[in-house]
Image: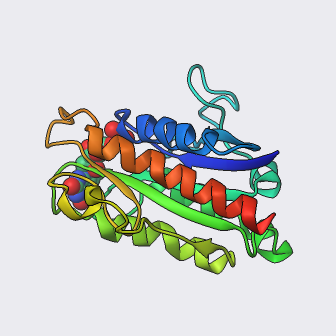
Amino acid sequence: MTEILILYYSHSGHVKEMAEYIARGVETVENCISKIRTVPRVSTVCEATESDIPSEGYLYATHDDLRQCSALILGSPTRFGNMAAPLKFFLDGSSDIWLSGTLIGKPAAAFTSTGSLHGGQESTLLSMMLPLFHHGMIVMGLPYEDDLLMNTTEGGTPYGASHLAGSNNERPISDTERQLCINLGKRVAETALSLNT
Ligand SMILES: Cc1cc2nc3c(=O)[nH]c(=O)nc-3n(C[C@H](O)[C@H](O)[C@H](O)COP(=O)(O)O)c2cc1C
């Protein structure tokens, strides 16, 4: 089976929900399975404050998850136009994966959620792509192949899937945003399958 790792951080749950729709897209592709993993929170007093196993939700990602995957899809809420620190912290610890070249040639993509419409969806998606390039991955976005991307008035970008959460995180994931998450998962899975990564 071709395994697609969906690795995300989420504080209020929107990016987590997007990860699940992306997984749904992955699973529409025959012989592909999704694996969803998250990362722990960080703080200025983060050393050994959390258990290795979260009390609820998805397991924390390990470097073995990165080694085993055929493709990687990263998700994070926007934090000042950038990816959130917990995901960056995990990626900053991935030098052994970089040194061994494990991810070279594998497809990758990104997804995000913002509070405001012009609050940095594209810049956050691009910020997640930078380490993916350094890992030698084949970074992918979403094509303008149907009307969804061209006509969206909420989330959805050619740089990856996105969601407009609203200033109080009050907006649910819309039909358009959901479909673009599914499309992204499907597209990455099909690419991994065709590349036989
Ligand atoms: C410290 C902090 C910084 C944020 N920076 C931005 C920002 O630059 N632009 C924006 O639109 N939203 C920003 N937000 C809002 C979050 O991106 C938004 O709530 C996100 O959709 C939550 O995703 P989640 O439900 O997966 O945690 C920020 C939130 C916090 C707590």
On the image, which quarter does residue 29 sit in? top right
Residue at image location 32% in from the left, 57% down from the top? 79
Residue 43 seen in this snapshot: no
Left or right, 81 with respect to 106, comes to left
**Which residue extends farthest front?**
146
Q: Position of residue 69 (x, y in %)?
A: 76, 53
Residue at image location 38% in from the left, 53% down from the top? 112
Q: Position of residue 194 (x, y in %)?
A: 73, 64
Q: Position of residue 27 (x, y in %)?
A: 63, 39
On the image, which quarter does residue 99 sit in? bottom right
> In the figure, 134 relative to 36: above or below?
below
> In the figure, 50 relative to 69: above or below?
above
Q: Quadrant of the N terminus?
A: top right
Q: Position of residue 92 (x, y in %)?
A: 62, 65
Q: Quadrant of the C terminus?
A: bottom right
**Which residue extends farthest right?**
100
Colour pattern of the rendering: rainbow
**How many numbered marks are there?**
0
Residue at image location 16% in from the left, 56% down from the top? 117
Residue 182 seen in this snapshot: yes
Towards the viewer: 152 or 92: 152
Towards the viewer: 69 or 179: 179
Left or right, 175 with respect to 29, comes to left
**Which residue extends farthest top?**
55
Residue at image location 54% in from the left, 43% down from the top? 25
> In the figure, 3 relative to 88: above or below?
above
